[in-house]
């Protein structure tokens, strides 16, 4: 029924029509003051007004007022040149909700334009099929891991085949894939005398490529008094679908996640990937017109907490191990701007004995990852990645710490390309190390078949 209601929407606003139009009131909130311009990565790289938040909002209003065509190439280009990093939103004095506006504009473009057959097939195979079911993602990442570990990867690089296929950089983005994936519902961490039970959002990339980081996250939570469960049947968060204008696919995943966490009686839902966290916290908005799920989605979103947000709100049990090294922290956009979580990760790192945290320049400027932006818009993504890498290298830090898988992969490849050797690590891995790592968590780790 909900899907029928979504498609039965026949409203029109200038060049926008049908479901998921940008909301007129939100468009009017912009007073064109320009205070967001210096925060916008694409404006800083191009210096062009049309590549700024103000320019893009002006174009959205122009389409809404019928002064510009929805499929005008300048409009479609600018809606997708934007990284959806939300840096503009975080500094806007008028409270413009830029993220939902650009996402609705993309949804409109996708509804009304016919992409070439090849692009449609790729989007269907990835966003629809691969990200539509965690089991398929595990199968795909499993094959990639075989490629990585079997020597095929080495041979492909040696033979220059990857270079010829233009995939050398893409391959370089992948970190060593975790040996054992984390399958939701099969692992649990329960410390002696737990104070609460929390549920870990596993995620499709975090639960496979970065499964060891999810286990590190669970151990740190357990060290701090939480029993950690990973409810079965949970799916991808849908963030990539929202960013790609595929809101119906995102809604389908959101409903399945709400069902999975509701039936497990979730108290707090902990997420360690900034992009996923931001999407989960916005399920209330995504499903606001769904009569069956609207309230449940809002209640679900209220329970979602970023790992650092949750930990920093309690007194941290003092870490036992020294981590003697210099590190720097790079802020994921969807943590700093979309969720406004900036102080908490630094607060936690400051409590790790031995750790020297050196602030880098432009820590919160987008690294160019932005979902699949670094795959679809290589030039801008590489330019931003180079800028970020140079700022990391200038600190002389041994590790660069972040809290999002997309940023981790983009940082890795950008630092390599710029001749740096800083390792990229998730904040959960560093905190876990400070508690003694895997060994100390074994006593309260249960695995079921
Ligand atoms: S989005 Fe906000 S900061 Fe940017 S021009 Fe509009 S009102 Fe000003
Ligand atoms: S979301 Fe980021 S890239 Fe897009 S307009 Fe805002 S600041 Fe610029």
Image: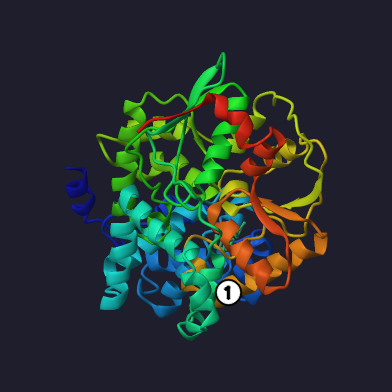
Residue drawn where x is 70% and y is 69% of the image: 387
Mark 1 is surrounded, within 10 Å at the Cα level, by few (under 14), some (14 to 19) or many (20 or more) other residues, namely many
Q: Quadrant of residue 111?
A: bottom left
Relative to the observer, which residue lies in front, 434 or 305?
434
- Where residue 70 appears, as percent x and y from the top left, is 35, 71
Considering the image in quadrants, where does the C terminus appear? top left
| Label 1 sits on residue | 380
378 vs 238: above or below? below
Q: Is residue 135 left or right of residue 408?
A: left
Residue drawn where x is 27% and y is 74% of the image: 114
Considering the image in quadrants, where does the N terminus appear? top left
Residue 310 visible within the image: no
- Where residue 11 appears, as percent x and y from the top left, is 25, 56
- Where residue 393 appears, as percent x and y from the top left, is 77, 64
Residue lying farthest to the front in this orientation: 150
Residue drawn where x is 63% and y is 74% of the image: 383
Residue lying farthest to the bottom in this orientation: 164
Q: Quadrant of residue 130?
A: bottom left
Relative to the observer, which residue lies in front, 60 or 116?
116
- Ligand 1 resides in the quarter of the picture at bottom right
């Amino acid at each position: 029924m909900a899907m029928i209601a979504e498609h039965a929407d026949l409203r029109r606003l200038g060049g926008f029509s049908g479901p998921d139009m940008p909301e007129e009131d939100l468009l009017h909130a912009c007073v064109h003051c320009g205070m967001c311009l210096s925060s916008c990565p694409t404006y800083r790289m191009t210096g062009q007004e049309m590549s700024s938040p103000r320019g893009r909002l002006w174009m959205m209003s122009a389409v809404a007022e019928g002064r510009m065509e929805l499929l005008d190439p300048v409009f479609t280009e600018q809606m997708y040149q934007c990284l959806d990093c939300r840096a503009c939103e975080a500094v806007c004095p008028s409270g413009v909700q830029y993220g939902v506006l650009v996402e609705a504009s993309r949804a409109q473009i996708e509804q009304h334009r016919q992409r070439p057959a090849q692009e449609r097939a790729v989007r269907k195979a990835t966003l629809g099929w691969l990200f539509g079911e965690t089991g398929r993602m595990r199968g795909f990442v499993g094959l990639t891991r075989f490629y990585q570990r079997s020597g095929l990867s080495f041979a492909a690089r040696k033979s220059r085949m990857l270079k010829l296929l233009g995939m050398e950089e893409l391959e370089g983005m992948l970190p060593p894939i975790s040996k054992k994936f984390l399958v939701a519902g099969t692992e649990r961490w329960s410390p002696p005398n737990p104070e609460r039970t929390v549920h870990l959002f596993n995620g499709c990339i975090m639960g496979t490529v970065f499964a060891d980081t999810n286990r590190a996250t669970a151990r740190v939570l357990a060290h701090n008094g939480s029993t950690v469960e990973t409810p079965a049947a949970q799916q991808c968060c849908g963030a990539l679908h929202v960013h790609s204008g595929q809101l119906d696919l995102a809604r389908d995943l959101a409903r399945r996640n709400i069902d999975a966490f509701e039936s497990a009686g979730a108290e707090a839902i902990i997420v360690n990937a900034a992009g996923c966290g931001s999407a989960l916290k916005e399920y209330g908005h995504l499903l606001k017109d769904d009569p069956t799920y609207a309230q449940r989605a809002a209640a679900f979103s209220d329970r979602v907490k970023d790992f650092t947000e949750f930990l920093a709100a309690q007194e941290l049990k003092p870490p036992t191990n020294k981590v003697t090294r210099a590190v720097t922290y790079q802020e994921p956009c969807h943590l700093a701007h979309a969720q406004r979580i900036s102080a908490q990760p630094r607060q936690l790192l400051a409590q790790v004995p031995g750790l020297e945290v050196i602030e880098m320049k432009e820590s919160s400027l987008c690294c160019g990852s932005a979902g699949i932006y670094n795959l679809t818009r290589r030039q801008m993504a590489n330019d931003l990645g180079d800028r970020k890498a140079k700022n990391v290298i200038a600190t002389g830090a041994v590790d660069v710490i972040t809290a999002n898988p997309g940023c981790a992969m983009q940082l890795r490849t950008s630092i390599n390309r710029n001749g740096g050797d800083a390792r990229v690590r998730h904040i959960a891995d560093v905190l876990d190390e400070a508690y003694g790592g895997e060994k100390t968590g074994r006593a309260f780790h249960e695995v079921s078949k």
